[in-house]
C-alpha cells in the first residue's frame, strides 16, 4: 500500500516514514498544502495522513478541494489533541478518521489498517484466499497447513495489493504505483522479479499473466 504523508514537521515526517515503511507501506511526503493537493490528485495513493496546520494551504482546504473534485482518497487527519473544533471541521470536510497530536506510531498504524479494512470490506488482521493467509501484523504468509513464510517488504506489499484486488486485471504500472514510493523508477522491470518470487511461493496458477494487459490474482472464492 502506498501512503501520502502530509506533514511540515520534517523530523516527525522522516520518523513516520521510516516507521511506516517497517509496517509494509510505501510512503511519500508532502510538506505543504499546495504540493499535497497536487500529489493527491495526480498519484495513486491508498490513504493520506493529513496534518491540518500546513504552510501555503491549510489541510482543511486541501481536503475540501479533493472532495469537491470527487477525489475519494481515504484521509486520516492529524490535529492538536485539544482542538475539538478542528476535528469537527475535518469530518465535515470529508475526513474518514482523525488522530490527535502527540500520538504513538502504533496507534497511527492501527488506524491506517482499520481504515484500509473498511475501505476494502475486510475483517481482522489477515487476508484470506483459497488456503492462503496473509498476516498484516507479522507480514507472514501461510499456505495451507505449512509453516509461515517470511516475506520481504516488497513481496508483502505486492501480495497484499493482489489479495485486495482479486480477479482484476492489474497492469504493471498500477502495481508499481501502489507498491513503491515516488522515487522508484517506474520503467524498471523489478516488479516482474517479485511476481516470479511470489509465484514460487504460491504456485504459478495463482498469478496469471494477461498478455499486453497485466496480471490477475486468482481467487475462486470471488
Image (cartoon, rainbow, N blue to C red):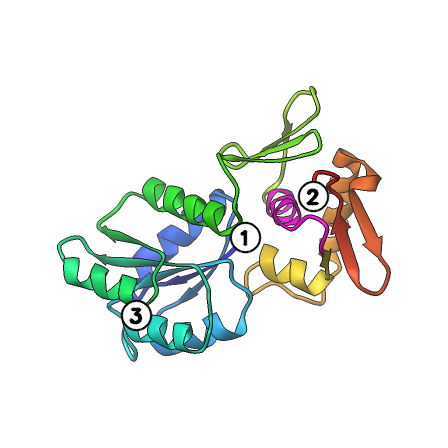
Q: Quadrant of residue 93?
A: bottom left
Which sits earlier in the primary sequence, circle 3 or circle 2?
3
Q: Are marks 3 and 2 in contact (CB under 8 Å)?
A: no
- Separation (CA) of disc 2 from disc 1: 21 Å
Which residue in the structure is indicated by mark 1?
1
110 part of magenta stretch? no
Measuring 27% from the left and 75% from the top, which residue is drawn there? 55
Identify the mark at residue 59; answer none if there is no mark.
Answer: 3
- Separation (CA) of disc 3 from disc 2: 38 Å
Which residue in the structure is indicated by mark 2?
222
| Residue lying at the far right of the rendered structure | 211
- Please give left or right for residue 216 compared with residue 81 in the image: right
Q: Say if residue 32 shows up in the picture.
A: no
Which sits earlier in the primary sequence, circle 2 or circle 1?
1
**Highlighted magenta segment, given as a residue range:** 154-168
How far across and how far down the image is residue 136, in percent? 52, 37
In the picture shown, does residue 28 fall above or below 149?
below
| Nearer to us in this view, 189 or 11 | 189
Between marks 3 and 2 in the image, the one whose residue lies nearer the viewer: 2
Which sits earlier in the primary sequence, circle 3 or circle 1?
1
Q: Quadrant of residue 201?
A: top right
Measuring 25% from the left and 46% from the top, which residue is drawn there? 103
Measuring 31% from the left and 59% from the top, which residue is drawn there? 77
Amino acid at each position: 500500500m502506498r501512503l501520502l504523508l502530509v506533514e511540515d514537521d520534517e523530523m516527525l515526517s522522516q520518523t513516520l516514514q521510516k516507521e511506516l515503511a517497517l509496517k509494509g507501506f510505501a510512503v511519500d511526503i508532502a510538506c505543504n498544502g499546495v504540493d499535497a493537493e497536487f500529489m493527491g490528485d495526480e498519484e495513486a495513493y491508498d490513504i493520506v495522513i493529513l496534518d491540518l496546520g500546513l504552510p501555503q494551504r491549510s489541510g482543511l482546504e486541501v481536503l475540501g478541494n479533493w472532495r469537491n473534485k470527487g477525489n475519494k482518497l481515504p484521509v486520516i487527519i492529524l490535529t492538536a489533541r485539544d482542538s475539538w473544533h478542528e476535528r469537527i471541521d475535518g469530518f465535515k470536510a470529508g475526513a474518514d478518521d482523525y488522530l490527535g497530536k502527540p500520538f504513538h506510531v502504533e496507534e497511527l498504524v492501527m488506524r491506517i489498517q482499520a481504515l484500509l479494512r473498511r475501505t476494502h470490506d475486510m475483517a481482522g488482521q489477515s487476508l484470506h484466499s483459497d488456503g492462503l493467509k496473509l498476516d498484516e501484523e507479522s507480514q507472514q504468509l501461510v499456505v495451507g497447513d505449512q509453516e509461515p513464510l517470511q516475506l520481504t517488504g516488497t513481496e508483502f506489499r505486492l501480495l497484499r495489493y493482489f489479495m485486495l484486488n482479486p480477479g482484476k486485471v492489474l497492469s504493471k504500472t498500477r502495481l508499481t504505483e501502489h507498491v513503491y514510493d515516488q522515487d522508484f523508477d517506474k520503467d524498471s522491470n523489478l516488479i516482474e522479479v517479485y511476481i516470479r518470487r511470489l509465484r514460487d511461493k504460491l504456485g504459478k496458477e495463482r498469478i496469471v499473466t494477461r498478455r499486453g494487459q497485466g496480471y490477475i490474482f486468482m481467487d475462486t472464492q470471488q
